[in-house]
Amino acid sequence: MSSGLFITLEGPEGSGKTSHMAPLIKWLEGQGRQVLGTREPGGTAISEQIRTVIHDLKNQEMHPHTETLLYQAARAQIVEQVIRPALARGVIVLCDRYADSTLAYQGYGHQQDLDEVRTLIRYATGGLQPDLTLLLDVDAETGLKRSSQRRSKGGEWNRLDAYELAFHQRVREGYLELVKAEPQRWVILDAGLTWQNVHTALRNAISARLSL
């Protein structure tokens, strides 16, 4: 059986990634493709429990090392339990965040040693990398404003959302550095455009990859 395609959506807070997941899955399924949508951290019972610990606003004492290791624990579980088996069945896996989030947030955001972080990621994933990564790019100020608006409407507001502006600026710059280092895997999309324009761009990028 042919291997599947691993596609990840990345972006700073407020970039709108999550809002595109369900419509993209529906669109791909409408083309007769087998699709699995999931998220990080999460996607399994164990990983969702870890997500709750990481994101809980009560856990303000959490050290960046602890944060980084917890993300890898959640990631190891979803890779082995969900992502690898789906890819082996020839399924398209669409994941809301993956290892690049750790490099952007825990690496660049917390200014931790990138080589050490990459070593942890390789251990957690067994070296599994996405075939295509779509970066919904938005400046930190706009993204945090959107997150705040989402919070006012009862949306999620977690411990990482609450980090200072400078942290989120480093995260965004980190993403752009990751793109420079591996341009063949990434497609940058302007998340400042209307939702429909962004969604059309996402579809076009995925269609181009599927046609290869």
Image (spheres, grey):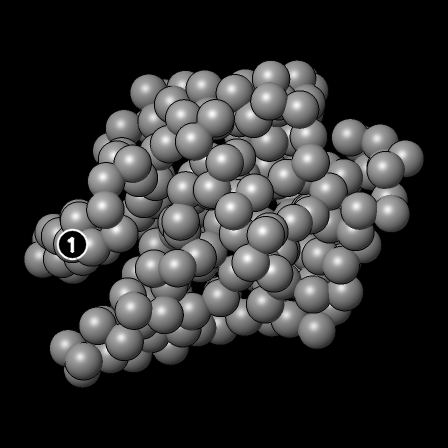
Q: Quadrant of the N terminus?
A: bottom left
Give the residue drawn at x 31%, y 39%. 191
Give the residue drawn at x 43%, y 31%. 142
- What residue does disc 1 label? 200
Locate residue 65: give its quadrant: top right
Q: Position of residue 156 (x, y in %)?
A: 62, 56
Q: Position of residue 2 (x, y in %)?
A: 27, 71
92 left or right of 194 in image = right
Give the residue drawn at x 29%, y 69%. 23
135 left or right of 171 in image = left
Q: Is residue 113 or residue 39 the one in the foreground?
A: 39
Q: Does residue 89 show up?
A: yes
Give the residue drawn at x 60%, y 31%. 105
Q: Is residue 85 or residue 56 the one in the foreground?
A: 56
Q: Secondary structure at mark 1?
A: helix
Check disc 1 and give the amino acid type. Answer: Thr
- Count the labels in the image: 1
> Dot 1: few (<14), some (14–19), or many (≥20) neighbours within 10 Å?
few
- In the displayed orientation, state which residue is furthest to the right: 61
Question: From what the image shows, is residue 83 above or below residue 17?
Answer: below
Locate residue 203: give its quadrant: bottom left
